[in-house]
Amino acid sequence: MLAKRFRLFIALVFTAAAVTALFVWLSRERPVNVIVKMADTGAVQETVANTRAGTIEACRRAGISPSIGGQIASLPVKEGDVVEQGQVLMELWSLDIQAQYELAQSETKAANANANQVCVRAEVANRESERQKKLQKKNLSSEEAVDRADGEARAQKAACNAARATSEVSEVKLKVIRAELERTRLSAPFAGIVAEVNGEIGEFVTPSPVGIPTPPAVDLMDISCLYVSAPIDEVDAPRIRVEMKANISLDALAGEVFEGTVKRIAPYVLEVEKQARTVDVEVDFICQQDCENMLPGYSADIEVILDEQDNVLRIPTEAILEGNKVLVFSADNLLRQREIKTGLSNWEWTQVIEGLSEGEEVVVSVEREGVEDGVAAQRDTAGRR
C-alpha cells in the first residue's frame, strides 16, 4: 500500500514538472522576424526631389490660330500628323482677297508694261536731243530745234520716272494684298506633330479677345526634344544650380532611371499652395535618344544631385531611426540599438561615417511590431515587408 502511494506521488511530481516546463516553453519570448541589410561600400548621392509630380514637356510647343476671323475652307491636317516647317495647316475662305490679288497682279503687270513703253520713248527722245546738238556744232541744225529736242528728252525722262513710280506703287499694293491673303492661311512655324485641331471645315473661327484665352485652332509640338518641368520646395531650391546632374524617373517606364542636367531654374516662387510654395526646375535629358518612347504630358520625377561620393560605407536609408540610430542584428541574435554618424543621404542610401563597420547587418523592417532594442530576432528569409 505504501509503495503504491509513493508511485502515485512520483507520478504527480513528474506531471507537475512537465506542466511547468510546458508553461515556461509556451510563455517564452519568441524571436521577431526582421529583414536585415548588410552595411557595404558604394556610391552615395545627396539629392533633392520634386514635391509634386513633374511633367514631360516638348522643347517647342505652339498653340496657333489665324490672326483674322473667317470660315474654315481647308483643313489638310489632322491630329497626329507630322508636318514640316511652313506647311499649311488651315485655310480660311478668301475668294474675295484672292480676286483682289489677281487684279493687283494684272494692274502691276500693266503698270510695268506702261513704264517700259514710256522709258523707251524717253531713250529715243534723249538720242534725238544728242543728235541735234551734234548737228548744231556743224551748223546743220538751228538753236530752236536743239531746244525743242532737249525739252522733249527731259519731258520723256520725267514721264519715265513717273511711270516707274506708279509701277512700284502697284508692286507694293500687290505685297499688301499678298500679306492679307497669307493671313487667311495658318502655316507651321516649325516642324512637329499636330497635337490638337479645334475646328471643322465650314466652321467659323475668330481671334481671341484681349485678355480672354480661347483654345488654339491648332496645337503644334516638336517632340524631337523633350525635358522635364517639376516643382521643387522653396527650401531646397537655393541649393540647385544650372548644369547640375539629375536623375529622371517616369511612372510610365517604371524601373528605368534616365540621366539629365538642370537647364533652368525659375526666377520666381509659385504660390499654388500657400503652405507649400515651390520653384519650377527644368531638366534636360542628357541623351535625347532616351525620349523616343516618351510622350509630352507623362508624369515624371527628378532628383537633383547636390553632391556625390564613391566607395563610402553606406546603409539603406529606411534602416535609420529618429536621432540617427539603427538596430543592429548582433551575433547572439539580439537587436542592439546603436547611434551612428551620417554623411550624404538620399531616399535610398545614407553614408555612415561612424558607428558601423562593413559587413554588420542592420534592420530595415523597423516598422514591424515588436522590433525594438534588446529583443530576440531571426532573419526573415522570405524578405516580406
Image (spheres, grey):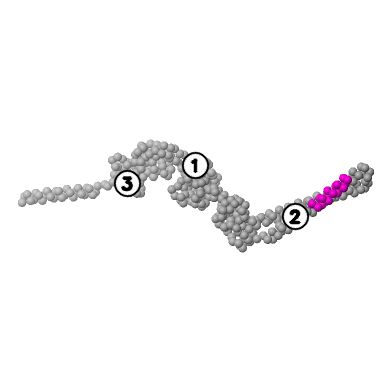
Disc 3 and disc 2: Cα gap in Å? 91 Å
> Along the horizontal axis of the image, is 249 left or right of 72?
left
Disc 2 and disc 1: Cα gap in Å? 61 Å
Q: In the rendered view, tell whether residue 357 sits above or below residue 302.
A: above
Please tell me how crowded label 2 is: few (under 14), some (14-19), or many (20+) other residues with Cα within 10 Å.
many
Q: Nearer the viewer, residue 50 or 216?
A: 216
The residue range painted magenta reads: 115-131
Decide: marks 1, 3 in contact (CB < 8 A)? Answer: no
Residue at the image position 12 percent from the left and 48 percent from the top: 10
Q: State which tag comes first along the sequence, 1 or 3.
A: 1
Residue, disc 3: 381
**Percent x, y of residue 100:** 71, 59
> Along the horizontal axis of the image, is 294 left or right of 95?
left
Q: Nearer the viewer, residue 167 or 227?
A: 167
Residue, disc 2: 108
Q: Secondary structure at mark 1?
A: strand
Q: In the rendered view, tell whether residue 195 sits above or below residue 288.
A: below
Residue 51, which numbered label?
none
Residue, disc 1: 245
- The part of the image, by quadrant, that contains residue 130 is top right
